[in-house]
Image (cartoon, rainbow, N blue to C red):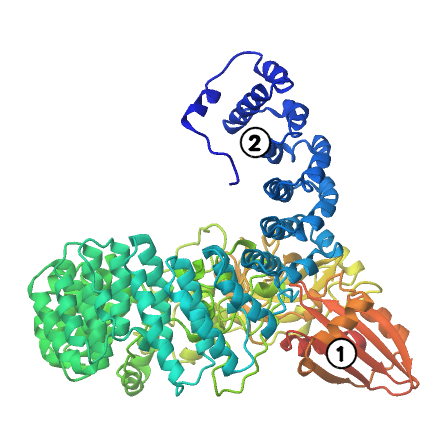
Amino acid sequence: EACPRITMTDSKYFTTTKKGEIFELKAELNSDKKEKKKEAVKKVIASMTVGKDVSALFPDVVNCMQTDNLELKKLVYLYLMNYAKSQPDMAIMAVNTFVKDCEDPNPLIRALAVRTMGCIRVDKITEYLCEPLRKCLKDEDPYVRKTAAVCVAKLHDINAQLVEDQGFLDTLKDLISDSNPMVVANAVAALSEIAESHPNSNLLDLNPQTINKLLTALNECTEWGQIFILDCLANYSPKDDREAQSICERVTPRLSHANSAVVLSAVKVLMKFMEMLSKDLDYYGTLLKKLAPPLVTLLSAEPELQYVALRNINLIVQKRPEILKHEMKVFFVKYNDPIYVKLEKLDIMIRLASQANIAQVLAELKEYATEVDVDFVRKAVRAIGRCAIKVEQSAERCVSTLLDLIQTKVNYVVQEAIVVIKDIFRKYPNKYESVIATLCENLDSLDEPEARAAMIWIVGEYAERIDNADELLESFLEGFHDESTQVQLQLLTAIVKLFLKKPTETQELVQQVLSLATQDSDNPDLRDRGYIYWRLLSTDPVAAKEVVLAEKPLISEETDLIEPTLLDELICHIGTLASVYHKPPSAFVEGSRGVQHKRLPPRSGSNESTESPDVTPSAAAQPTEQQPAVIPSQGDLLGDLLNLDLGPPVNVPPIPSSTVQMGAMDLLGGGLDSLMGDETEGLGGDLSGSPAIGAGYGTPAVMPTSLTAPLGGGLSDLFDLAGGMNMPSGSYVEPKTVWLPAAKAKGLEISGTFSRRMGHIYMDLSLMNKAMQVMTDFAIQFNRNSFGMAPAAPLQVNAPLAPNQTIEVSLPLNTVGPVMKMDPLTNLQVAVKNNIDVFYFSCLYPINMLFVEDGKMDRQIFLATWKDIPNENEVQFQIKDCHLNADAVTNKLQSNNIFTVAKRNVEGQDMLYQSLKLTNGIWVLAELRIQPGNPNYTLSLKCRVSEVSQHVFQAYEVILKN
């Protein structure tokens, strides 16, 4: 009933386009005749709807509010909502009418007034609306109360402080005990909405009494009310399995609801609480049986709903396959299903495949493989392979089915079959190799990279069983440079395997592929693999055999299962977008303020605590352990650094083709030089004459000190930035250390340190050229790191760097780069490029660079936060041999953004309470005990992210002792 219906006869209001229209409307709005007024307001709304500006009529329309006619009132309120924001001063005129309408005898008008008030987002007006809203929250009519409950959430969005001061939140909590179920549902919806934007507020203080009220209301609300209540129940943690069971019993009837959203919300609650039930309970079995029919019923809806249902079922089947294990038939594909439903059903069929139903499944899949839809056929052929890997007893039938499909000679079917047969070989070695001959017949028809790579792998892996393996592989070599990377890599490995199995007849072939991969290729992955094989083969063929022909681990059945912690989180989001995307909300909610990570309750019989972890609002930026999704492990690093795109391409003088380009120097630990040792023969002397390597070798690793002294001078020496002595004011700067020795970087030596000046972080670098050639075109890039450190500007090296010259550069940094947790936490991996090459090094930045200037906490907040952080997060350290009094300590720490919040003297010892804040919003609280005459201080640190504490302690030590 939000807006009046426009009937066919109303279309006349949209047709007038007279001149002087506004003037005429003004006259009509002020007419004495009610009908004329109503016509005029309709015309105004019609003009507003098509985008004309009728704000000039504001006072005249507002005058029409004084009416008993509900239709007219709704129209005027519509107008008001639209123009209140652009005409706030005028809108105040309407406030009196709101106040009056909130006391109108007709509950529909009272509710309409409250609803409109919530939609007027004008700060000036908001405070006038508090009194009317307070009355409506206690109105005797439930329709008005339920509207007022939603209004509180809208008001909270406009001005949260006002809502809290006026005590509306407490009134909302009282409404949870209201006698009318719709009021309860709206109160729950409003509180949930508010709680979402304030994750730590604990507004919905759920206890067994409130839960009981919610469950009572559940039976009598509208469907959307039921969804709000069910979603709220899903956030509750029952105290024991008895309570979990009684809630499940009262939620189960919702499974037979006609609205699929109610069904999915109920499934979510049951899936969550089942974690707490022991599997031996009779009730557990009953519940499993009850969950299947509603899920099956969802699949008879229209395709779009089916798709959402299938995505949710996919999660449920991964968590508890036993629920649907007897329902395989409903996932069989119908001829008229859209492709997105077909592919999703296929996925679930594989997940449910077992020894009991495999015969049915295979018959279905074989049928699908002859369909016309290419994507679907491909997925069906893959599915046959996945069945073979999942159900061992069926492997033989699957392989023969795949061979039948290969005989059809349909190109894309053959290619998919070869890809999955490769996996079957990996799972059951020495069982089905008799089919290799059939596969080899189809070599010429393969044109997709994945299929070609799979075939090459098979030929290389079973080279000793294939007489003409060398010819087959040679046929691929002819167009080596046109192949995709995965085929090139596979071909390189396969030929090396072949060489190790039949060394005499394939020597030429292996030399050919190694030279193609290393000298004629510009792909670093391929070059690296080529060099490693080349080294292995030329130094130690026995080791090469052990590495390349090692036993391969068997592949597991389900490679595409969702990682367990993510699956548990997604189960908590059943029925929401997260369950369709299969991603946690934090991955796609813009700004994700206050997106909380949900967890399933601990399993019955496990002794985890039921406390949910505190996730602060800036969780996305924090290097905490609870977020496997946000901060990937350090395993991805080498790949990341290799893909650094460092500025525009530079014109490098051509290097003779025999050279080995050492781009990936530091990525292999000691660089390729450690692989190479000192021997450079064995590759036909190719490497020894190479200028690219030679340049970096003869130089001693440790330079005479006179060379490393900064030669910069100039302004930086006034502040003694280079020397790194303590500046009279400002934060402590460590002396520069050598980060990249010249021997590792073809003559470029980089030393540096970090400083914080005027609230900005700088990386202060000295670049020294110890090579014989001029260096230009410098650029720098950082890898992802724990605190998102990244260059805030390009590396400014304006003049070319001549041999034996040093330049001092200050690079401004910011902390808005990509985040990934590093080990150690403050590790920073850097790539620097110049006209010679790209060089990699890593360094540690002192954590005090991240201490921000507004890190002083208010005393009361400090006290509350100290109590709120769990005691197990408190860590104690000893700072030894420090001879400063409390005031000197305070001043020294303050200039490094560690602020003293309070100071007390207890039994002769000074206690300093201090706070600091990191750039990503993590707070660290400290208590420093100083006993006069005792040079050892005790430092206690508390922080929600405990791994930060060790680094903060090191910062304290460095600052106080320098």
Residue 655 as seen in the image, left or right of residue 896: left
What residue is drawn where x is 75% and y is 75%?
866
Say which label, 2 or 1, has the lower sequence index: 2
- Residue 6 x, y percent position in the rendering: 46, 30
Q: Is residue 81 above or below residue 237?
A: above
Q: Nearer the viewer, mark 2 or mark 1?
A: 2
Q: Secondary structure at mark 2?
A: helix
Q: Is residue 439 above or below residue 587?
A: below
Number of the label disc, if any, that sits on residue 75: 2
Number of the label disc, if any, that sits on residue 703: none
> What kind of residue is marked 1?
Glu
Quickly name the residue at label 1: 957
Q: Secondary structure at mark 1?
A: helix
User: Who is closer to the viewer here, 508 or 90?
Assistant: 90
What crowding class fits label 1: few (fewer than 14 Cα within 10 Å), some (14-19), or many (20 or more)? some
Q: Which residue appears farthest toward the right when viewing the image?
A: 908
Query: Hey, which quadrant is residue 116 in on the image?
Result: top right
Query: Hey, which quadrant is residue 364 in on the image?
Result: bottom left
> What kind of residue is marked 2?
Leu
Q: Find out whether the residues at labels 2 and 1 contact each other: C-beta distance under 8 Å.
A: no
- Residue 191 x, y percent position in the rendering: 61, 59
What residue is drawn where x is 64% and y is 77%?
946
User: Who is closer to the viewer here, 503 or 946?
Assistant: 946
Residue 846 as seen in the image, left or right of residue 311: right
Rendered-image quadrant of the C terminus: bottom right
In this orientation, does residue 882 appear? yes
What crowding class fits label 2: few (fewer than 14 Cα within 10 Å), some (14-19), or many (20 or more)? many
What residue is drawn where x is 50% and y is 87%?
606
In this orientation, does residue 582 appear? no
Residue 523 as seen in the image, left or right of residue 774: left
What residue is drawn where x is 26% and y is 60%?
343
